[in-house]
Amino acid sequence: MSQFIINGPAKLSGEIPVNGAKNLALKIIPASIILADEITITNLPDIEDIDRALSLLEILGGKTEKRGSRVKIDTRNLNKNELPKDIANKFRASIMFVGPLLARFGEVKFPHPGGCVIGAGGRPIDIFVEGFKKLGAELKIQNDHYILKAKKLRGNTYFFPNVSVTATESLMMTATLASGTTTLKNCAMEPEITELAQYLNENGADIQGAGTPTMTIKGVDNVSGGKFHIIPDRIETGSFAIMAAATGSELTITDCRPDHIQILLTIFEKIGIKYQRGRDWLKIKRSPKIQPYSIKTHEYPGFPTDLQPPYTVLMTQAQGTSIIHETIYDRRLFYVDMLSQMGADTIMCDPHRVVVNGPTKLYNKKLTSPDLRAGIALIIASLVAEGETQIGNIYQIDRGYEKIDKRLRKIGVNINRSK
């Protein structure tokens, strides 16, 4: 098994560019299923989940031509509507193919989607199924597979019982080809949703209210293709910003959208992290003293759950006590035990809350990454720690951060990949 070997402590310097948003790329690829023409996607991140999504599209009969960060997709001859278990079980984003396939073929068969360990038992798909039923689909479960059928999808009103980014995007895409008008309430409001809706509208869809709690979608006969440029990854932007702050470094983050992490920058101002920003760049300044600040994760524009693990590492270096309250996912705080092994002073109150006392000196350890976002947090902790830290199961990190070791070496990190 590959692992990262990191020697700390590290001082970062120079510039690091942000890649395309993983959470948008994994939605525009299945969205190609409802398009009547080819689509060319640019600024595509080179990560494993993207390769899996493209492979799944090809298995369904689509054609893909990928060159670097650019891919051309043609789904006009798509001829299958069943998601193979061996691929769908490996990544959560396979659920995003279900709605478009249902809208196009009137039937789709799929297994329960897989992904990070934080999804085990904690990320059910009932909210998707309920939404599809509201649009007229009927559900049957057979041989560990879900089968959804609909002679004709029809618009309806659906209230999401929980705010869900993927469910909002999935129902939005599905309703685009449904007959009549669909109203979605209690929608997620992430920038990725707005970008996806804007693209579909530019190519023939009629989606109103994206980026607000209520969306109205008037069904159309078809949506054309064209070009789509993926916006910068806001989670990657925030991860690099926290990395610089935790190591007391000066670092410029380029090709980013600072306005998409406004909640983090607001907190930086409260805790003494100095920065400068432009439209597409962010410079983190050296900050000798970090004040503690408690957070509670929340849907956008609140504090993102995906930045909670890196922020927890930052609070180990703050001058006092903070409380981290994870409200979105169960199991997401399990990595805190590894921070404690490194010397962090933490008290686990319950599965959703941890008290962090700082500042504490962190020391090298042999660790295993439990999931994608905890993995980048362990890298940040390793940059703060004294000595050589080994991080295993880095497959989880590679899923979301393209060539992270190579990119970090360019800004002064002593990191190597070992098999």
Image (cartoon, helix red, strand yellow):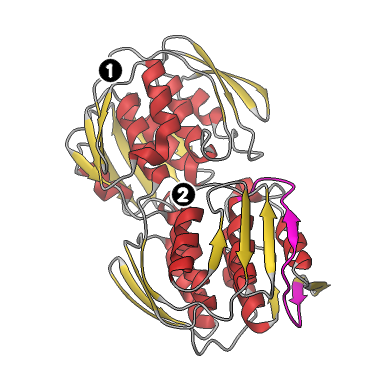
Q: Is residue 363 left or right of residue 32?
A: left
**Callouts 1 and 2 close, C-beta under 8 Å:** no
Spot occupied by residue 181 in the image (x, y as percentages of width and height) = 68, 67
Front residue of this view, candidates 9 and 214: 214
User: Which residue is disc 2 drawn over?
Assistant: 191
Q: Which mark is residue 326?
A: none
Q: Of helix, strand and loop, which one carries label 2? A: helix
User: Which residue is disc 1 drawn over?
Assistant: 287
Image point 68% across, 30% down: which residue? 351
Front residue of this view, candidates 222 and 104: 222
Say what amino acid the circle numbered 1 marks. Answer: Ser
Look at the image and tell me whether residue 120 can be seen.
Answer: yes
Image point 35% across, 55% down: which residue? 20
Q: Is residue 370 above or below residue 290?
A: below
Image point 74% across, 57% down: which residue? 158
Spot occupied by residue 73 in the image (x, y as percentages of width and height) = 41, 78
User: What is the span of residues highlighted in magenta in the rendered image?
Assistant: 146-164
Foreground disc of the pair 1, 2 = 2
Number of residues whose C-alpha sits closer than 10 Å to that of mark 2, classed few (under 14), some (14–19) or many (20 or more): some
